[in-house]
Amino acid sequence: QTSTYTADRRVVLEMLDNIEKGLQVHKSQQEQLVDFWLRQHAIVKSELSSLLTMASAAFNAEDIGVEELQGRFQKYCEFLEEHEQVEDKMLFPLVKSLFPQSAHALESVLDPERHKGVDQLNAKVGRLLQQLHDRHRAGEEMVLNTREMGKVVEALERLNDFMVGHIRYEEEMTMPWFEIDQNPWLDSLRRPLVS
């Protein structure tokens, strides 16, 4: 019976060793995923900052580059839409499946009301830029539109503030689940068996 116990213990230790190796690979993959996700958040914030700078410069100089600003805003919206699809369809469901205890936190992150605010602010900026673009195309004097560009700047400021909070909230609700070294469930798998 002792030899059976020793053999069983060896099998269990080997399985735990394989789990540990798998966790290390898993941890590396998680770190790559989190790094990618955080870089995307940085791109969103940087792009909003650039758009705000462009709109502010246009407003202050009365030289309105509506087409360039509108084109850049459309690219930002496309990037944001792809980013949100990755989060909603892949990243957050993955976190929920890896860490079932994260479900409540992630439900709040996935709440459609949170995205509605982003969508509404993006739509407002888009409408304002489209109106300016249409007027510019119709040959109207752009000097009259500096006041309207002020509305674009104001809307971009609100969007920027909202998105910074939106991103911070997502990171605060999600990042703790990726901090493997602080996750007690995974730590319990790593503890050696008592001899």
Image (tube, grey):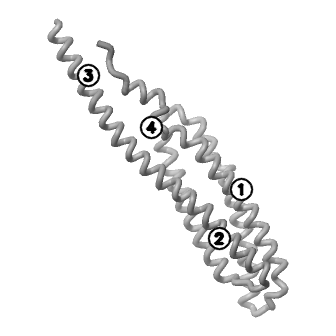
Disc on res. 162: 1
For this orientation, the residue located farthest to the left is 3
Q: CA distance from mark 4 to mark 3?
A: 23 Å
For this orientation, the residue located farthest to the bottom is 139
Q: Secondary structure at mark 1?
A: helix
- Whichever of callouts 2 and 4 sits on the residue coming sooner in the sequence is 2
- Amino acid on which the number 3 mark rests in the picture: Val
Q: How many marks?
A: 4
Which of the 4 image quadrants contains residue 143? bottom right
- Amino acid on which the number 2 mark rests in the picture: Ser
Residue in view at x 35 percent, y 39 percent? 24
Q: Is residue 110 above or below residue 11?
A: below
Q: CA distance from mark 2 to mark 4?
A: 36 Å
Pointer 3 local density, CA inside 10 Å: few below 14, some 14–19, many at least 20:
few
Which of the 4 image quadrants contains residue 128? bottom right
**Does residue 73 appear to the left or right of 135 in the view shown?**
left
Disc on res. 50: 2
Please identify, in this view, whether the residue under mark 2 or under mark 4 is nearer the observer.
2
Q: CA distance from mark 1 to mark 3?
A: 50 Å
Q: Pointer 3: what residue?
A: 12
Q: Is residue 103 above or below residue 15?
A: below
Tell me whether circle 1 and circle 4 mark residues in contact (CB < 8 Å): no
Q: CA distance from mark 1 to mark 2?
A: 16 Å
Residue 65 in picture, x, y percent from top left: 69, 84
Q: Secondary structure at mark 4?
A: helix
Pointer 4 local density, CA inside 10 Å: few below 14, some 14–19, many at least 20:
few
Disc on res. 114: none
Residue in view at x 33 percent, y 42 percent? 25
